[in-house]
Image (cartoon, helix red, strand yellow):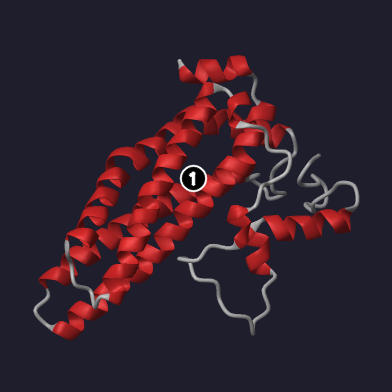
Amino acid sequence: MKIIDTKTGKRVGKEQKEINLKLKEEDPILRNASKQLDQDELSPMDPPDAYEMNTPEVEEKATYHPLIQQYMTEHESALQVVEEFEKAMQRFKEGGYRLDDSINDPLRKFFEFFENNLLDHNRREERQLFPLLHKRLIESGEHSESEKPTTAIDMMEDDHVKFIQLGALVFNMLGLAARLPDVNSRMFTYDVAYDNARELVETIKLHIYREDNVLFPLAHKLITFEEMSIMTS
């Protein structure tokens, strides 16, 4: 089933109303977009229920090419580190921004993982998988109707850039705050670091969710096993 009608730019398929309702229930972006203004805002530290739902028609990881399996396994490792970082930042704020080993160790582990593993993972996706998948998405009609068609790949690459920006901002704000002699300035800077850390955590979690449940299944359908093997080599 095509996600986007190439003429209208709208979602298409059987039982349109039913499908739209289902998508709103399963897609965290659509769920957030449909929220009423008077509802409580979802915190980035408390992701929507959609993260815990089983997305239909997603095949077992074992059926994917080893390249995709590797990406997904690396996602599992990343989520573990991100969740430890998330909990440590929460404790850090609740404790009045006082550092101890239980907070410092997860923060150090996160930034080391971010620099040495996560950025490398993103670069490999951009070099190996994204170019051909972007082409196949356009060929299959899964793109915008703009003058220069965009696909889900453009969104994923934008996320990769956002990771770098937010990660650098959080790291630098934490380092700066620790050196500020004025208490009010130090607390304000820690608050800025914490708020951006929340956004970074949510961005990474949602990015991984979309890749595992939308992008990789599309890659499995649109790219042959042989083509995947060429990417790996």
* Placement of 135 over or under 224, stated as above or below: below
Give the image location of residue 55, x and y in percent: 68, 46
According to the picture, the residue beneath numbered tag 1 turns out to be 157
Name the quadrant containing residue 216.
top right
* Placement of 148 over or under 22, stated as above or below: above
The C terminus: image quadrant: top left
Q: Which residue is drawn at 29% across and 56% down?
A: 168
Image-based side of 61 in relation to 196, left or right: right
**Residue farthest to the right, as pictured:** 15
SS at mark 1 in the image: helix
**Residue farthest to the front, as pictured:** 102
Image-based side of 138 in relation to 90, left or right: right
The N terminus: image quadrant: top right
Residue 126 seen in render? no
Q: Which residue is drawn at 48% across and 66% down?
A: 44
Give the image location of residue 183, x and y in percent: 15, 83
Q: Which residue is drawn at 50% across and 20% down?
A: 231
- Nearest to the observer: residue 122 or residue 138: 122
Give the image location of residue 138, x and y in percent: 68, 36
* Placement of 23 over or under 95, stated as above or below: above
* Placement of 173 over or under 163, stated as above or below: below
Residue 2 seen in render? yes
- Please tell me how crowded label 1 is: few (under 14), some (14-19), or many (20+) other residues with Cα within 10 Å: some
Q: How many marks?
A: 1
Image-based side of 144 in relation to 162, left or right: right
Amino acid type for the residue under numbered disc 1? Glu
- Nearest to the observer: residue 52 or residue 146: 52
Give the image location of residue 85, x and y in percent: 33, 57
Name the quadrant containing residue 225.
top right
Image-based side of 114 in relation to 71, left or right: left
